[in-house]
Image (cartoon, rainbow, N blue to C red):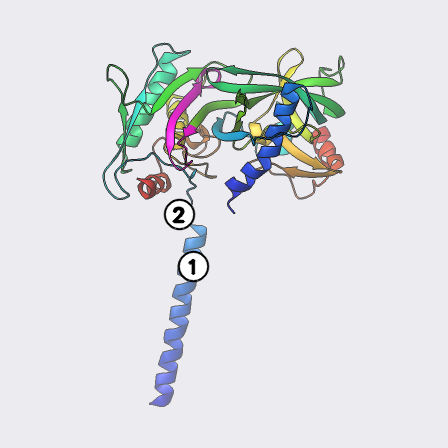
Amino acid sequence: LASTFLLWARRRLSRSLALCALVISAAVLSPGTASAYNLEGQTWANQAGPGTCCANIGYHLPLIWSNANVDENGFLNAASAWNNSPALIWFNLDSSSNFSNTMIQVNDENDCSVGWDGLTSYSYDGSNHFIAAVSAYLNACYTSGYAPQAVQDVAMHELGHAVGLAHDSGCFIMNPVASAAWTSCGISTPTQDEIDAINALY
Amino acid sequence: MSWKNLVRLAVVPVAAGLLAMAGGCGSGPATTQPKVTMIDASWAEQYSDVGSLSRASDVAIVGTVTGVASTRVAGGVPFTDFNVRVVRVLRDPQGRLAASRTILVHQTGGPVAANHFLEVHDDLLFQPGETMVLFLREFAPGQFRVLAGPGGRFEVTGNSLAPTHHGTALPANVRTVNDLGREVAKA
């Protein structure tokens, strides 16, 4: 009886070790399972707490664009993509008369003397813990030659920065080369990793 | 300490140096720490290897930053033009560097107020005295920008090379400027 029990225990242990190894391997090798997002460190104040729907982020479109057909649509489509995702955030186009709800001013440039197709600039509150205002840009020098999905990815990337997400290597909207999310990975909506990042913040 | 904080610590002396150079005087030690705010960029170009980076560049050089030529702010975004002395030409198929051994390299970032700088997270402003390998695109006669932001920039210490954060990976056999020069010549 004792030897039978030992044999059973040994087999049970082997199976457990094999299962454990399998789980660890899957966790290490599968790109989508591990939490890989990076955060800037600051967030918008006075938003719904993590797990509560939803942070409410106002953005404003300018009247004059370098390339409205491409860049204005890029930002509008990007906001829709975030809003239609499970991320607990809502980008609202500020249509108030005095733009009092504007937190993110979006715009575009047409500047071929730089290597960026999107840029986000911040200011913070005195404590440096909270975002006070954001300007997000697309660069028509590059976006005018992009597929609409790639423009949307760059605009989503900038909106991601605008709410506290940082760069993330791999098939993510927050890849430092945001257009590659479409051209290399076929992605045109926020990934689960980015949804997790937003839902950790807001 | 986080990577971000390390970067910020590294940036402050750079910004202070820039401020002193922009002011054009060295009348004494700075009394106020400059405020540095990071901005974030999405890069329009990426190259998976040194060969493709080299083929896409107009010129590739080893250069030393000698100072700030000018700064400006447009649409709320600051830009800085640096004077870079060409130490060694690695690639110049069209002879763009024949006229001068000092070129202007344009970077996003710089002063936005008396003691306030904006700086791109992945592509920190050059430091005067810094030596780098730069893969460049000439966007106007005599004016260059770095290809792919951090991807076209390699730090040089002595003869050793290192890619920047989010920069183009170097092959295992490329450890020195001479190694990189051979890779560029093959491209």
**In the image: residue B39, left or right of residue B187:** left
Q: Nearer the viewer, residue B117 or A194?
A: B117
Q: Element type at marker 1?
A: helix
**In the image: residue B7, left or right of residue A153:** right
Q: Element type at marker 2?
A: loop
Confirm whether residue B82 shows in the render. no
Q: In the rendered structure, which amino acid carries the disc numbered 2?
A: Ser
Residue in the picture at 75% in, 15% down:
B100
Q: Residue A145 appears at what percent x and percent y?
A: 45, 17
Badge 2 crowding class, 10 Å Cα cut-off, few under 14, some 14 to 19, many 20 or more, is few
Q: Residue B140 appears at what percent x and percent y?
A: 62, 11
Choose top left, top right, bottom left or bottom right for residue B47: top right
Mark 1 sits on what residue?
A24
Badge 1 crowding class, 10 Å Cα cut-off, few under 14, some 14 to 19, many 20 or more, is few
Q: Quadrant of the N terminus of chain A?
A: bottom left
Write down the chain letter for disc 2. Answer: A
Q: Closer to the camera: disc 2 or disc 1?
A: 2
Q: Nearer the viewer, residue A33 or B153?
A: B153
Residue in the picture at 27% in, 23% down:
A101
Q: Residue B159 appears at what percent x and percent y?
A: 75, 38
Confirm whether residue A91 shows in the render. yes
Magenta-colored span: A123-143
Q: Quadrant of the C terminus of chain A?
A: top left
Mark 2 sits on what residue?
A35
Q: In the rendered structure, which amino acid carries the disc numbered 1?
A: Ile
